[in-house]
Amino acid sequence: MAASTSPPVDFSAALVMAPTAPAEWLVILPVAWCLAIGALLVMLRRPIGLHPTIAVAGLVGLVVIDGLLLHQIVRHGPMTMMMGRWLPPFGIAFTADLMGALFALVAAIVALAAGIFSIADINDSGRRYGFYPLLMVLMAGVSGAFLTGDIFNLYVWFEVLLISSFGLLVLGSEREQIDASVKYGFLNLVATTLFLIATGYLYAVFGTLNMADIARKAEELRSIAPLMTLAGLYMLAFAMKAAAFPVNFWLPASYHTPRVVVSALFAGLLTKVGIYALIRVMVMLFPVEREELSFVLAIAGALTMFVGVFGALAQTDFRRLLGFLIISGIGSVFAGVAVGGPGGIGGAIFYSLHSMLVMTGLYFASGIAMRLGGSASIVTLSGLYRRNVGFAALTLMLCFAVSGLPPFSGFWPKVMLVKAALDIGAWWLAAALLIAGFLTTIATGRLFLLAYWRDGTTPAVNVAALPATTMAPLAALTLVALLIGLYPEPLLSAVQSAAAGLADPSAYEKSVFPGGRP
C-alpha cells in the first residue's frame, strides 16, 4: 500500500501550538469547578443530607481557586486561555485581569458565607427542589461573567446565572414568590434581549466579539462606525441589570420574597454582575463614548441614589428597606463611572466590592432578626438588642459600613468618589454622594432604633435556638468590612491598579495577542 504523500498541515496559523501552562488553567477552573460540583449534587439527589456538606466544601475550593488566580494576576499580569486552542480572535477567550479576579474572589467569599448560612435556612424541601445545585450553577454563571474575554460569552454567562436565579427565586412556590418572579423575569428578559441586540450590532460593526480585539479596533473605527449608539444600548441594558433609575422597580418588588439566603445571594452578586459589565464595556471598550455619556451617567447615578435612599426611609419591611439600599449603592457606582479617571473608576470598583460583602451581611441580619422577633416588620420588631447583644452589635457595624462611616469598608470608596467628583469640578455630584450617605445613615439609624434599641413587648426567642451557622457568616462578613476599613491599603492599591488596567488595556490585549494582533 502506497504511503500518503499529502503535505503536512501547518496548524500554527489557526491553533495555539504551545502547551497550556498549569497556571493558565486557573482562568477557566472556577467555572468548571462549579459546574462539576453542581453535576455531582444532581447525581446525589437522593441523600439530600449530603448536599450542604458537598456544596460548602465546593465553595471553599472555589475561594481557594479564585485566591490563587488573583495571586497569579498580581504577580504576572492578565492571563488568557483560549477554548479549543483556536487563535484569537476566532476562539472564545477567557481572560482574567485584576478587576475580574477581584470580583470573582469576593463573589466566592459571599457564596461561601451564603452556603454556610443556608445550612439552617434551607429545609429538606428546599434541598429536594435543588437549592444547592442551583447555587453552584449560579456561581458558574457569575464566575464566567467575571472571567470571560468575549462579549457574546458574557451574554451566555448572564443567561446561565439568570436561569439559576429564576429557580432560586421561586423555591418554595409561595404566591408572592411567583408574583415577584414575573416582575424579575420580565425586566431581565428585556435587558438580556437588548444586550443580545447590541452584541449583534457590535459584531456587524467590528467583525469580532473578542474584547481585546474590540478595544484595539475601536479607535480606528470611531470616525466611521456608530459607536455612540452601541455604547448607549449597552449602558441601558446594564442599567436594567444593575437596577439603576428609572429601571429599578423590579428589585424591591422581588428581593424580599425568597428565602433569606437567596435574597442575600442576589443582593451580593446579581446587580454587581451588571455593574461589572457596565464598567468593563464603557471604560475599556468605549472610553470616548463613556466620556460623552458622562453627564447622563451622572444624572442617572444621582437619581438612583436618591430614589434608593428615600425608598429605604419609607419602608417598614426589613428586607424591602435593604433592597432600596442596594439601589442607592448602585447610584454611587454610576457616579464613579461618570466621573472616570483612576479615582472615579477605582472608587466604583471599591464600592462594588464593599457592597457585595456588606449587603450580603445585612440580609443575613434580617433573617436572624426574623428568627428572634418572629416578624420582618421593623414596626413589630423590637428589643433585639436585649435579646442578643452580639447580634445587635454586628448589625450596627454593618449599618455604619453601608452608610459610609469610618472605620468600616464603605468609608474609603465614598472618599474616593467624592474626591474624584470635586477634582473635575462636579461639586453637585459630590454633594449628592454626601447627602445620600447622610440619608442612608438616617435610614439605617431608624432601622436600628425601632427594631433593636426600642423596648420589646413580644416574648424573646431563646438565643440557644440560633444555630452557629447563622451567626458565623454574619460575624465573618462584618469582620472583613471592619478590617478593610482599618487597613484599606492593599485593596485600595488593587482597585487603583485595576482602574489603570481598564484605562490602558495594553496588558490585557497583550495577554490575548502575545505576538500582536494579526
Image (cartoon, rainbow, N blue to C red):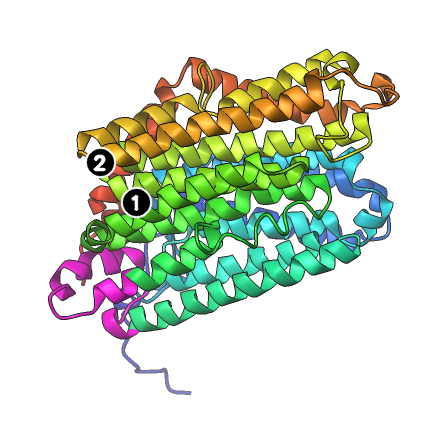
Task: Tell me which amino acid carries mark 1.
Answer: Ala
Mark 2 vs 1, N-terminal side? 1
Q: Which residue is mark 1?
A: 298
* Residue 260 rendering spot, x and y as whole percentages: 71, 39
What range is drawn magenta here?
A: 204-231
Q: Is residue 92 visible?
A: no
Quick check: 229 left or right of 19?
Answer: left
Quick check: 482 left or right of 342?
Answer: right
Q: Quadrant of the C terminus?
A: bottom left
Q: Is 208 one of the magenta-colored residues? A: yes
* Residue 163 rendering spot, x and y as whole percentages: 61, 60
The answer to which image quadrant residue 492 occupies is: top left
In this view, the residue in front, 508 or 311, is 311
Q: Look at 79% across and 41% down and name the residue there.
A: 122
Task: Tell me which amino acid carries mark 2.
Answer: Ala
* Residue 401 rendering spot, x and y as whole percentages: 50, 23
Say few, some or many: other residues with alpha carbon within 10 Å of mark 1 (under 14 / 14 to 19 / 20 or more): many
The reply to whether discs 2 and 1 touch (Cβ–Cβ < 8 Å) is yes
Q: Is residue 181 above or below residue 401?
A: below
* Residue 174 rendering spot, x and y as whole percentages: 79, 55
Q: Which residue is mark 2?
A: 426
In the structure shown, which secondary structural element does the residue marked by tag 1 occupy?
helix
Quick check: 118 left or right of 152?
Answer: right
